[in-house]
Amino acid sequence: MEIVLIKAAQLILSLSLLVIIHEFGHFLFARIFKTRVEKFYLFFDPWVSLFKVKKGDTEYGVGWLPLGGYVKISGMIDESMDKEAMKLPPQPYEFRSKKTWQRLLIMVGGVVMNFILAFIIYIGILYAWGEQYLPTANVKYGIMVYEPGEKIGFQNGDKILSVDHIVIENFKKIIPTVLLDNAKTIQVLRNGQQVDIEISDESLALLIKSKSVFDPRLPFNCKADKIVKDTPASNAGLEKGDVFVNIDGQKFDFYDQFTGYIKSHKSQEIQVNVLRNNVAKTIPVKVSEDGTIGFYPDFLPSATDFLKYETISYSFIESIPAGFSKGFSTISDYLKQFKLIFSTKTKGYESLGGFIAIGNIFPGAWNWFSFWNMTAFLSIILAVMNLLPIPALDGGHVIFLLFEMITGRKPGDKFLEYAQISGMVLILSLVLYANGNDVFKLLKQYF
């Protein structure tokens, strides 16, 4: 429960910051062009608000429905659907009375602020923490493959050489590179021979849906970290801190051999030999039907000290261009994901997630490095999504304003009203679909 609360707190804080910054962008440009802003709200406030205070012409408040936020600009058809105000003669302080280019800047203000925020955060991250990565060449024992990776064709011990014959220096960027660049092959070293693993559309679909495909292969030097309740491990008396020695007298060189042995003995009793406080113990454990016993491992230093990470440090001046470079590459990578989401071959849309999926990306313990990384990434997502040419989003308003600038004709209020309603229905449908996916995935875990 504590982990859930920490994840939720990080998600709420991050989204609140992003929404405030986004809406401040609209607010700032509106004020620059002397346009009245009637409301500035974090979260939505149908019928009632949690807090509100009025300063000048603007009411500032916090709503009770945590689905974003908004600014209500006078003389504009927006989510408030204030039709009565639009029937009155235009006033000099209203949005509809401003020049087209001014209205355009007001509408893109939120997106601009989100991009700026992401760049600033990346600059700060690189200056404070630098950039740490695991060189692919340092993955000494090759990879430990999970079920999705096995289906694609990987084997335990494979050493990744290249993707489409291009060496990927950062081990953690191998899978993203395959997905975003639509790679066709991955070259691995297997038993001293180079092998090409073909990446089909089915393989891409597996990569999109899978949380883990492979990790660095680790030696069999571990202990039990967390024992899951009501599992064979807990029922047999396995305890946190027990250091694994062997099973049935069978010794292992690598952790995947250990888990593979357990998996090959589904519904059978095995003798797990451990050291508990330096005292040898043999614990009979009956393996579950799915080939697990119910524990999380904690690897001893001797199992991980060979993984030599590299860290690139930046001075403040150096972090500025590096932060912008990281921001632009993140934007580029996110745009590439759209072709995967809408592809009928990879069915990326089936992996769309809502608030639960986003919340689960945050770590279970508070970590400022992870928090700021995720906030920068979500800021880019918010900016890009708002640029989509969908009525009710900033991008929809921008399309209508560009049409007006090119043709010299302004779309009618009735058309804008219907477009706004259509856009809101579409967005609500997407939100329900994404969050429905989350709920469906949760139900699948328990039923």
Image (cartoon, rainbow, N blue to C red):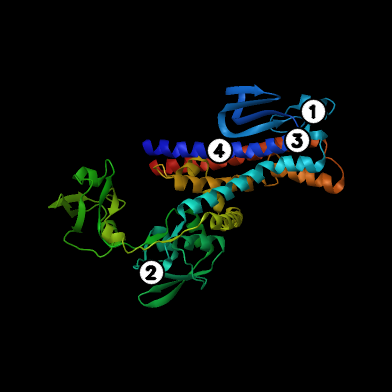
Q: Is residue 397 left or right of residue 355?
A: right
Q: Label 1 neighbourhood size at 10 Å, few (<14), some (14-19), many (20+)?
A: some
Distance from Cα at disc 4 to Cα at disc 1? 31 Å
Distance from Cα at disc 4 to Cα at disc 2? 43 Å
Q: Which residue is mark 2?
A: 158
**Which is nearer the N-term, disc 1 or disc 2?**
1
What amino acid is labelled 1 in the image?
A: Met
What amino acid is labelled 3 in the image?
A: Tyr
Q: Label 3 neighbourhood size at 10 Å, few (<14), some (14-19), many (20+)?
A: few
In this rendered view, identify the residue nearer to me: 165 or 120. Answer: 120
Give the SS element for disc 2. loop
Which is in the foreground here, disc 4 or disc 3?
A: 4
**Which is nearer the N-term, disc 3 or disc 1?**
1
Residue 418: give its label. Answer: 3
Q: Position of residue 418 (x, y in %)?
A: 75, 35
In this rendered view, identify the residue nearer to me: 429 or 157. Answer: 157
**Which is nearer the N-term, disc 4 or disc 3?**
4
Q: Which residue is mark 4?
A: 17
Give the SS element for disc 3. helix
Q: Position of residue 396 (x, y in %)?
A: 72, 43
Residue 86: give its label. Answer: 1
Quadrant of the image occupied by residue 151: bottom left
Distance from Cα at disc 3 to Cα at disc 1? 14 Å
What amino acid is labelled 4 in the image?
A: Leu
Distance from Cα at disc 4 to Cα at disc 3? 31 Å
**Which is nearer the N-term, disc 4 or disc 2?**
4
Which is in the foreground here, disc 3 or disc 1?
A: 1
Placement of the C terminus among the 4 image quadrants = top left
Give the SS element for disc 4. helix
What amino acid is labelled 2 in the image?
A: Asp
Which is in the foreground here, disc 1 or disc 2?
A: 1
Q: Is residue 409 left or right of residue 344?
A: right
